[in-house]
Structure formats: structure tokens, C-alpha cells
Image (spheres, rainbow, N blue to C red):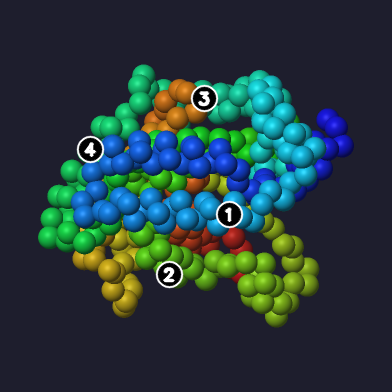
Amino acid sequence: MSFYDKTVLGLGLSFNYGIDSNCIIEFLSSYENFKTKSKFDNLDYSVLKGILLGSILVEMKKGLILPKILFSSLTELRKNNNIIITKSDKGNKIVIMDKNDYLTKMNDLLADRNTYRPIRSNPLKTLQADFNRELKEILLNNDELYSKFKAYLPSLPYMYGLPKCHKQGVPCRPIISTVGSVTYRLSQWLAKHLSSYVGGISHSHIKNSEDFVNKIKNFNLTEKKLVSFDVVSLFTNVPVEDTLQILERYFGRRTDTLPLGRNIFVKLLKLALSQNTFVFNNNYYVQLKGLSMGNPLSPVLANLFMENFEINLLPTILDVSVPW
């Protein structure tokens, strides 16, 4: 790898090298395709086109900020089909992997038939139709929310792996990106309203490292040890039905109200978690159990499950003198 290759990668995966005139052609082509296929009511397409095109022109006026030699290196790196350029699971470092090695690691994960099952074809159209139908049934008298969450031109979730450089053998953490998927907007909204519940079941929940320091700074830890526990593949091992039952019980202990009736809210939760299909390397799969990392709901539900686990199981195995 040349000095210029390393330099351009050192700018980070979020670096934006600017927009050239080819983007205008690509935009106009994509826009016309969108206009033909979309079914939005009361949408002024000419106004939408003007807004989007104006944004692109503003960016173009800023000019390219990447030197030609670095732009050339970036182009060559993108053409190299033998490597995968991604970020590490921790530390936000750039990682370059041999593509065959990457695919082998990911396919080994997908070979777990207790967690994943291959399917023959792209189920997106069926998923969209089923979701919109069930959403309409649940929100029968709430046209505003139905319009907000109805799936328009969705994409199928896709899996990718983040290499765990800090672990021997550099395994990959499977992420299923649900951005733009059938359930994405609904999941975001549900997660937002559930986030305040995290930390309410167990007093041991911590927000960040500063919160952790504040909680233990006054403990007398003489002749005691600090021990941490780790759950292997937490998200895929969270029992979804059990977690929803925990959540329903917890709803009854809260004094604040949900944005919808409890029964409707739970139905929406089940709907958002019912679609677990994704694509990897042009092959289609369904996740059979647990939560997927990449779904906005997953961190919230995983935290709530672990909080309930802590208050019910840990007291039976830990000494009563454990301070926290």
C-alpha cells in the first residue's frame, strides 16, 4: 500500500471529498425513477426537485478539497475487489481485510442454523405489503401515525461485519443495518419512547464511565475485587417474548403514560420486531431468534432484559456483602 493510499484512508471513512458534475446526472436519473415509481399524494415534485438540486449545487460551489493524487488513490482503492475497507468494532479505526477472509468469517456466522436460515428470494414486496396491512389494522383510528410509519419505497436490511481487532483471530461482529427498511421509522419512534425506561428496573444500570465512577467512588472496596461479566452474543440471545412480558409488567409500575394505549403500543412493538429478513453478499436470510444489532429497538430491549436478569438472578449467586 502506497503512502498516498495510507494518507487518504487516514482521513477517515466519514471524509467527504466533494461533489462533481457527474452527481447532477446521477441525481436527475434517480429523481425521474423515483417520480415514476412513487405514489405520494399531494406532493409537488417540481418543488422537491428544486430543493434537492439546490442543495447539490451549494455543495458543488464549495469545490473539491481532495488533491488529485489522493483522489486517484481513493479511486483505485474503490476499484480493488479483493479487499474490504471498513471500521473496527472498537476504537473507530480503519481496517483493511482480504475479501475472501472477510466472507469466510461472515459465512461461518451465518452457518449457525439456530440463529439464521437462508431463504430463496427477496421478500421485500411481501414484507412491505404485510407490514402496511397490519399497521393499518393496529392504527385503525389513527391516520396520522399510520401515514407516519407506512412503508414507502423501503429497502431490505443488509448485514455487514465489524472486525474485532482486539480479539484473537479477529472475528467479526454482525451488524444488520435497518436504515430505510420497512420497520425502521416505527422502530425509531418506539425506541425513543422506551428509552426513559432504561435504568428504571435495576439500580446497577450505568449511563457512561462518568456515571460509573460517581456510583462507586464512595464504596469501601478494601479486601474486595472488581469483577465484570460479559454476555456472549447478547443481542441474538435476548429472548424477545420474555423481554416483551417484562416490559408489559413494568408498564404497570410506571406513573407516566405511553403515547398510545398499552395494548396498541405492545402490538406495534411486536410488529416492529416481526420482520427479521436481511441480505448478505446477494443471499437472503432470516434471523430466527433474538435481536439484531442495527435495529433501533435492540439496545433498549437488551438493556431492559439484562436489568431484569440482574435483579432476579444475581442476588441468588452473589454474597450479600457485595456493595453494588
Q: Which mark is residue 129?
A: 4
Report x, y in % for residue 209.
67, 67
Q: Give the answer, above or below, for where 68 lies relative to 279.
A: below
Depth check, mark 3 against mark 2: the one in front is 3
Quarter of the image with the N terminus in it: top right
Q: Earlier in the sequence, mark 3 or mark 4?
A: 4
Count of numbered tags: 4
Q: Amino acid at mark 4?
A: Ala
Judge whether 193 appears above or below 217 on screen: above
Instruction: Assign a secondary structure to mark 1.
Output: helix
Give the residue displayed 87% in from the left and 37% down from the top. 3
Q: Position of residue 269 (x, y in %)?
A: 31, 53
Local SS, label 4? helix
Tell me what residue is drawn at x 78 percent, y 44 percent: 67
Q: CA distance from mark 3 to mark 4?
A: 25 Å
Residues at marks 1 and 2, CA–CA distance in whole angstroms: 38 Å
Residue wearing tag 2? 196
First reached walking from the N terminus: tag 1 or tag 2: 1
Residue 138 versus residue 169: which sits nearer the camera? 138
| Left/right of residue 310 with respect to residue 88 in the rendered view | left
- Which residue was labeled with disc 1? 59
Precedes in sequence: disc 4 or disc 1: 1
Q: Residue at x 42, y 27 (%)?
A: 285
Residue 27 image point, x, y percent? 46, 41
Q: Residue at x 52, y 51 (%)?
A: 56
Name the kind of residue labelled 2 in the image: Ser
Q: Work out whether residue 219 can be spotted.
A: no
Under circle 2, the secondary element is helix
Which residue corresponds to mark 3? 281
Nearest to viewer (mark 2 / mark 4): 4
Q: Going from the N terminus, do you reach mark 2 or mark 4 first?
A: 4
Measure how far apart labels 3 and 2 are at the Cα level.
37 Å
